Amino acid sequence: MSTTGTDKPDEASATEPQGPDEVSSDGPAEFSSTYRWIVMGVTVIATFAMVLDTTIVNIGLPAIQREFGSPDSAELGNIEWVLTAYLAAVGIGQMLTGWLTDRFGRKRCFVGAFGTFTVASALCALAPTLGFLVAARILQGLGGGLLMPVAMAMIYALFPASERGRALGMFGIAVMAAPAIGPVLGGWITSSFGWRWIFSVNVPVGLIGVPLAIAMLRSDPGDPKRELDTVGLVLSTVGLSLLMIGFAQGEKSWVSLTTIGCLAAGVGLLVAFALHSLRTPVPLVELRVFANPVFSLAMVILGLMAVAQYARLVYIPLELSHIWGLAESKIGLVMLPSALGMAVTMPIGGRIVDRLGARIPVGVGCSIFALSYLGLVFFVSEGTSQWVVSGWLGLGGLGGGLAMMAPNIQALNSVKSSLVSQATGLSSVTRQISTAVGVAVLSSIFGSAVMSAPGGRNDIGPYRLMFMIGAALFVVCAVLGQFLPNRTRARELQLDRQAEAEEFAFMATEVG
């Protein structure tokens, strides 16, 4: 196989081995436009609830802390497990995506994941103790971790190759809008109704969405003979959990025995998992897909984008709080143009990928986002109008909408249709691990900058440093994006995927 993103990969090579066929027996051409957008609506509702939950809970942590402990309580130091346990469980759920969809089909996996997420949300709201809450969060994370990659795989399978960028761009609005809304909604719910309602709001969404999914989604065949790679499951589950815990502990101290031990053990187990996966005939996760240069490059870009995004999602609210003294509700309004900008340009970015490939949206979008960060560094100070801050954030949102889904779309188009569920799971895990690494590293850099700044957290210098790092990462992504397939090669990949769908539909008709 060629090692360049613009050369056509060898479809028969070992880098994309044949796995259990995951394409629905109904080829994309057999799905009506109405049905496609019904599925889009159902999956967007579920994904929005899951992503919203990831950000909304952060605001409720102080209230949870007050109920389950006091400053002198031993349980107070364990409040972080409400987040850490959830994130680790999300990663595990994402790792299981490929096997579960192979074994049970996409519809059953989606309904099961949505139902699990809903039930777990109710249990979180009713939690009598912190330990019970953490256990419910693990269950919630397992369901939530499955939702996004399964939803992406369903949408990818439903739409023709020439429309997948636009469809995934529409789907991405929910993924990007939820983090912008989460802090504002979380603050309002917590102050008005109490922290338990942060979880309760998911329940009516699930009570409507799950029956709707059961009634509206078409069943697709699974493979009852698909074996579970038990060894791979244990290695990946324990390894990923320890890695996430290690990075969470690293925000406090990188030299503690807990941090070093968790990181070392996590990396060791994941290396063992990778070696095992490459040797076993039917692995839990088909890691050989990373030998596809287009897919691997897209994952690198997605990971760097996830880290760069963290600078906006976390340090903008902190700056507005500590430097401007804004209340949480006003912070949300200042940041709202960023979410609106993404909502406007994300479908446009997907459409550009359909027609021209990912180079242009990644290059232009990341450059615009980098420019917005530089604007926050050089043109925003303590006396700057909030409208100016919103303007720079809105500009970044426009760029982010163009760039964020483009690498993912290109990555999925580069792998065989039978590996799409595996690929969406790996894409989600990549973002999850990248975010964990980014949170830990940027938090350490920010903490050091705050310690050396004259005004501490009330000094604008540490925040500007975070935005400079974010700008640099987006510049790197813009450059890397130019090594993705060009227009001609991107079109060839679309046609390859379309031919696979048509061939499978023909074979299914012949068998019927």
Image (cartoon, rainbow, N blue to C red):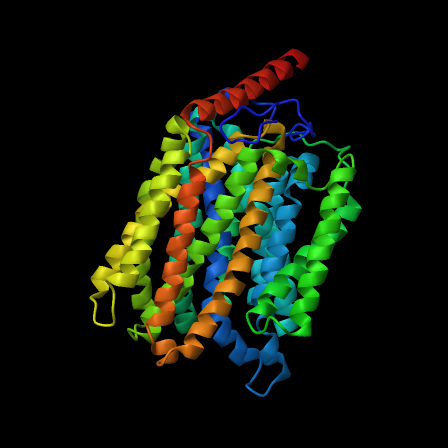
Identify the residue at horizontal 29%, vertical 67% (top origin).
330
Q: Which image quadrant is residue 278 in? A: top right
The answer, for residue 383, to whether it is visible in the render is: yes
Rendered position, 245 above or below 97 = below
Residue 104 in picture, x, y percent from top left: 68, 37
Instruction: Return the residue nearer the eye: 398 or 308.
Output: 308
Rendered position, 305 above or below 251 = above
Residue 228 in picture, x, y percent from top left: 76, 41
Identify the residue at horizontal 53%, vertical 34% (top origin).
294
Q: Which image quadrant is residue 41 in? A: top left
Residue 51 in picture, x, y percent from top left: 48, 53
The C terminus, quarter of image: top right
Identify the residue at horizontal 40%, vertical 73% (top origin).
191
Q: Report the side of 186 relative to 424 (left or right).
A: left
The N terminus, quarter of image: top right
Rendered position, 36 above or below 304 = above
The answer, for residue 213, to whether it is visible in the render is: no
